[in-house]
Image: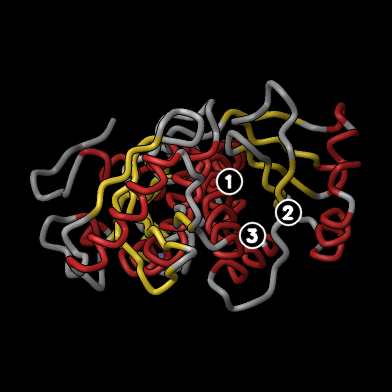
């Protein structure tokens, strides 16, 4: 079905590009274009070639990010991918680090950079590498980016604690993340998962543009995260009746507007989201997309 041209960046680029072209044709667009679901710019085949210029280039996009086990579901343009990846997705990775550090049920975090500050001498701060997790033993290694005198003081203080059985008086810097940026990052990833599943019918809808403006920080949007319903942690749940859908990211569900919902209805639903989950029978579950499936676009193309 897919023809890999030796000039293509990869098989995956070709597969997603062709799926996007088909999905776009499914909503009546003529020609062979892939539309970046985020900025809506059109790209032709040149954008997936090995020699594509950086300002005309489509890149593989994971959703959710690979830091929490996501898959490549779509192509986005390089500028969208780079700008949002470093600003937003990095916060999902940092959040995951934090929860891995404190949650015994998650895999161990990667070693991270922290600081030890002594209460008795707050000016003495030591840069350290921390590995392990709370409750499972923590290893702290002083980095070689420290002033030797600070190292000596910190070591003396820690040794005193060790010898006297005293409690450590100081602070240990933990992996930090910015919650509001992490929420916008999850909103972007929910948007991409919904694009992967429902194609341009979703991504070009008014409600989807509203949330895209939110994570592009062109408009205000409230991001609501809920406890998942057990059994549906990694699903997309659609509640057409109330104009919302939920995207499951393992430890929570993110609330998004459904296609054709009015923004007012979505905003109202965000005020009382738990009541929607309580209305269990009105939810329709879909599995998360493993690649660009665009099932709604395909459905409408079959009708045509
Ligand atoms: Zn773009």
Kindly identify which residue carries mark 2. 224
Q: Which residue lies furthest to the top in this view?
A: 231
Query: Is label 1 in contact with label 2 (beta carbons under 8 Å)?
Result: no
**Which residue is at 86% across, 42% downward?**
274
181 vs 304: above or below: below
Q: In which quarter of the image is the C terminus?
A: top right
Residue 194, numbered circle: 1
**Number of residues whose C-alpha sits closer than 10 Å to that of mark 3, classed few (under 14), some (14–19) or many (20 or more):** many
SS class, disc 2 = loop
**Number of residues whose C-alpha sits closer than 10 Å to that of mark 1, classed few (under 14), some (14–19) or many (20 or more):** many
The answer, for residue 31, to whether it is visible in the render is: no
Query: Is label 2 in contact with label 3 (beta carbons under 8 Å)?
Result: no
The answer, for residue 45, to whether it is visible in the render is: yes
Q: Earlier in the sequence, mark 2 or mark 3?
A: 3
Q: Would you say the beta carbon of the disc 3 residue lies within 8 angstroms of ligand 1?
A: no
Q: Which of marks 3 and 1 is nearer the N terminus?
A: 1
**Which residue is at 38% across, 69% downward?**
83
Corner quadrant of residue 5 = top left
Kindly identify which residue carries mark 3. 208
64 vs 280: above or below: below
Left or right for 187, reference 227 = left
Residue 71: x and y in percent read: 40, 37
Circle nearer the viewer, 2 or 3: 2
Query: Is label 3 in contact with label 1 (beta carbons under 8 Å)?
Result: yes
Left or right for 170, reference 201 = left
Residue 156: x and y in percent read: 30, 55
């Amino acid at each position: 079905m897919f023809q890999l041209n030796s000039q293509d960046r990869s098989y995956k680029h070709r597969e997603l590009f062709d799926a996007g072209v088909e999905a776009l044709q499914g909503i009546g667009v003529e020609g062979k274009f892939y539309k970046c679901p985020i900025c809506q710019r059109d790209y032709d085949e040149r954008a997936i070639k090995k020699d594509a210029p950086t300002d005309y280039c489509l890149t593989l996009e994971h959703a959710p990010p690979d830091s929490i086990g996501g898959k490549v579901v779509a192509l986005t343009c390089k500028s969208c991918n780079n700008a949002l990846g470093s600003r937003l997705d990095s916060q999902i990775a940092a959040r995951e680090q934090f929860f891995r550090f404190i949650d015994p049920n998650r895999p161990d975090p990667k070693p991270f950079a922290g600081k030890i500050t002594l209460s008795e001498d707050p000016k003495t701060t030591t840069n350290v590498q921390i590995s392990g997790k709370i409750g499972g033993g923590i290893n702290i290694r002083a980095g070689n980016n420290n002033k030797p005198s600070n190292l000596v003081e910190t070591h003396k203080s820690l040794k005193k604690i060790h010898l006297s059985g005293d409690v450590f008086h100081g602070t240990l810097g933990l992996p930090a993340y910015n919650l509001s940026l992490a929420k916008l990052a999850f909103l972007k990833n929910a948007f991409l998962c919904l694009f992967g599943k429902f194609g341009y019918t979703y991504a070009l809808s008014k409600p989807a543009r509203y949330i895209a403006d939110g994570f592009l920080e062109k408009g205000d949007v409230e991001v609501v995260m809920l406890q998942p319903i057990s059994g549906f942690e990694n699903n997309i749940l659609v509640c057409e009746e109330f104009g919302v859908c939920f995207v499951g990211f393992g430890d929570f569900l993110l609330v998004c507007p459904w296609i054709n919902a009015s923004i007012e209805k979505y905003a109202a639903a965000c005020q009382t989201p738990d009541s929607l989950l309580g209305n269990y029978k009105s939810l329709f579950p879909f599995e998360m997309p493993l690649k660009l499936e665009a099932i709604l676009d395909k459905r409408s193309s079959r009708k045509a």
